[in-house]
Image (tube, helix red, strand yellow):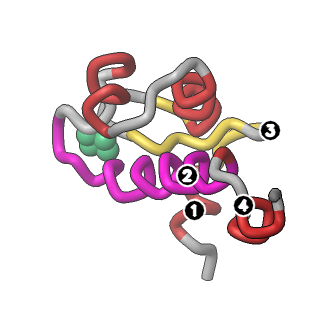
Amino acid sequence: MPAIIDYLRVSGDAMYICLCNRITESEIDQAIHNGANSLRELQQTLSLGTNCGCCLEVANGMLQEAAAEKAPCLNELFYAA
Ligand code: FES
């Protein structure tokens, strides 16, 4: 039985995260890359989550992953001096 994430993947690397507004994973990635760092900013930029809101949990996970990638590693901070 395919996972829902496989069902949402359409062609190539395009995967819809917000079905209501036809917003893809790559569009969210691009918005985050361009400086969106909260769900509110993604909603303002892309209209993400403005209908049923089912996409907000995934989008929030993408924001958290991006923030973790930007944050310095604790070891780097501890041993920087
Ligand atoms: S899936 Fe995003 S608002 Fe419904």
Is there CB contact under 8 Å for labels 4 and 1?
no
Residue beneath the point at 43% across and 47% down: 59
For label 3, count other residues whose C-alpha is less than 10 Å away and answer few (under 14), some (14-19) or many (20+).
Answer: few
Q: Earlier in the sequence, mark 4 or mark 1?
A: 1
Quarter of the image where ligand 1 sits: top left
Identify residue for label 4.
77
Q: Secondary structure at mark 3?
A: loop
Mark 1 sits near ligand 1, with its Cβ under 8 Å away: no
> Is residue 55 found inside the magenta-colored segment of the image?
yes
Q: Position of residue 81 (x, y in %)?
A: 81, 58
Identify residue for label 3.
12
Identify residue for label 2.
8
Image-based side of 49 in relation to 27, left or right: left
Q: Earlier in the sequence, mark 1 or mark 3?
A: 1
Image-based side of 35 in relation to 60, left or right: right
Identify residue for label 1.
5
Is there CB contact under 8 Å for labels 1 and 2?
yes
What separation in Å lies between label 3 and label 4 (alpha carbons)? 39 Å
Q: Which one is closest to the eye, mark 4 or mark 1? A: 4
What separation in Å lies between label 4 and label 1 (alpha carbons)? 36 Å
